[in-house]
Image (cartoon, rainbow, N blue to C red):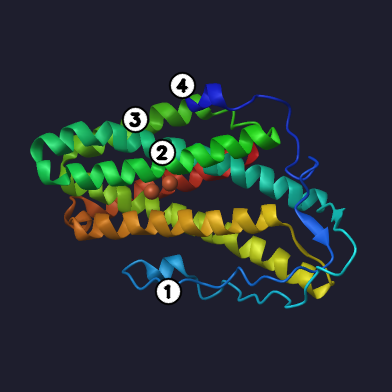
Amino acid sequence: MTAARIVTRASPRSLLASPSSIVSRPVQSKSFLSTNGRNTASAAVAISPHEPEYEASQHSNSDKAPCRPTPLSAEQRRFLDSALRVNQAGELAATLIYTAQTPQLVQSHPQLRTLMKHMYDQEAGHLKIFNELLAKHRIRPTVLYPVWKVAARTLGWTTAVMGREAAMACTEAVETEIGDHYNNQVRVLLNWARDLEARGETVSEEMRELLVTLRRIRDEELEHLDHAVENDAKQAKPYEILTNVIRGGCRTAIWISERV
Ligand SMILES: [Fe+2]
Ligand SMILES: [Fe+2]
């Protein structure tokens, strides 16, 4: 079943318009936002120096009144709707790129079979997560879903025809943009959490889980970037033109998918 069939095409509704509120009172005690210990070639992208640290309150809510939902602002709801819509489109594109690349790459370089399957499996896992989130919160997919599907298949097929290095350069370029994209979302959610804490409120378990999920996916995307560089992405010809075109395409697709 394709993602388009899985996702409900209901009218847009905020993530927080549902009974499952993101924000609640009173303060809960959990420190869940520590940065991880990535130390790879892509660490500079993975852990932005601008990503704020956040230490949740150590107060316990076990002896306090039950949590009372506090809705996020309309601007925050729009941000989440838009971010999750883009994430879903991006993960669909990633699975299609690898699907198009793998047969050609494995035929000429059988040693890449395990790596390609590993990366595809992770992308399929990411796509499943965002399909479920969009369906759960009735967020519509981007209207350009069919366009991105064609573009992703074309990109994957073309770079595989160009050779192993070009295919890896494609992964490097895509994951650089996607890593930044997820980093931005993580930073925004961290800032929300910090602001809530400053007001004596906290984030709900649902938002905690989303933040943990986004960080994990970001790190997996950047692991793909590392694999691509290790497999001679930078030997692609013409490397600069190819990666700049792909990165520009990714940024354009993200910009459009955020809006429609
Ligand atoms: Fe992914
Ligand atoms: Fe990826």
Q: CA distance from mark 2 to mark 4?
A: 13 Å
Q: Given this view, does label 3 or label 2 mark the residue nearer the observer?
A: 2
Taking depth in this image into account, of 166 and 129 the one nearest to the observer is 129
Q: CA distance from mark 1 to mark 4?
A: 37 Å
Could you tell which of marks 4 and 3 lies nearer the N-terminus? 4
Q: Amino acid at mark 2?
A: Ala
Which residue sits at x=69%, y=32%? Answer: 138
Could you tell which of marks 3 and 1 lies nearer the N-terminus? 1
State whether residue 69 is above or below residue 27. Answer: above
The C terminus is located in which quarter? top right
Q: Given this view, does label 3 or label 1 mark the residue nearer the observer?
A: 1
Determine which residue is flagged by label 2. Answer: 124
The residue most toward the right is 65
Q: Given this view, does label 4 or label 3 mark the residue nearer the observer?
A: 4
Determine which residue is flagged by label 4. Answer: 1
Q: Provide residue 135's location: percent of width, then percent of height.
A: 63, 32
State whether residue 202 is above or below residue 56. Answer: above
Could you tell which of marks 2 and 4 lies nearer the N-terminus? 4
Determine which residue is flagged by label 1. Answer: 37
Q: Amino acid at mark 4?
A: Met
> Looking at the rendered structure, which numbered label has been put on residue 153?
3
